[in-house]
Amino acid sequence: MGKNLKIVLVDDNTDFLFTMETFLQRNGFEVHTAEDGQKGIDIIKKEQPDLILLDIMMETLFSGFEVCKQVRSDDDLKAIPIIGISAMGDELDINYSQWPDYEYFRPDMFLEKPVDKQRLLQLIPEVIQKAHKRMRSPKWKKEMDKDWAQKASQKQRP
């Protein structure tokens, strides 16, 4: 599966970066890492990966939330699937899957740390395949969805 697939891994925990990079490379993926969000965006723009693994709560000012927002608002990047990863369940006793914020943070999938590596290997092709299907939807459907989203946002304005 990993042959020729490129992953950008963005996380401020260098131990996690090393462990995941090593694991993913051993499973055939090309992996590029970044220790903060700004470096992550730079690498994502340069490498145009097949998938982004993104820590959402980094110690830097440019958090995973900001990276996700920039990727989703960039026409050249928005099709890249994102798997959000966080330890906030352990650190803050908050389960993201119970309190998602899809308006601001829209990953294709979300995983809690510690990441089950075998599950991740199973999810990677699924997430990539779903993203490709989403981007291949007919033009009329994309336009209809865009119109619907605009109308919905206009209704929310006071």
Image (cartoon, rainbow, N blue to C red):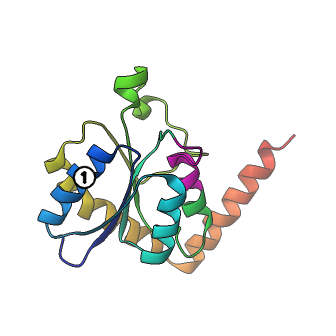
- Our reading of the magenta stretch's main secondary structure is helix
**Residue 122 position in % (x across, y down):** 18, 55
Hey, what amino acid is under mark 1?
Answer: Phe
64 magenta-colored: yes
106 magenta-colored: no
- Tell me which residue sits at (25%, 36%) in the image: 114
Q: Secondary structure at mark 1?
A: helix
**Residue 30 position in % (x across, y down):** 25, 71
Mark yes or no: residue 42 visible. yes
**Residue 42 position in % (x across, y down):** 52, 68
In the rendered image, the quadrant that contains the N terminus is bottom left
Residue closer to the observer: 73 or 9: 9
> Badge 1 is on which residue?
18
Give the magenta-colored segment's residue range. 60-69
Q: Locate residue 21 relative to residue 93 in the image: left or right.
A: left
Mark yes or no: residue 79 visible. no
- Tell me which residue sits at (21%, 69%) in the image: 29
Residue closer to the observer: 85 or 103: 85
Image height check: is 122 above or below 137?
A: above
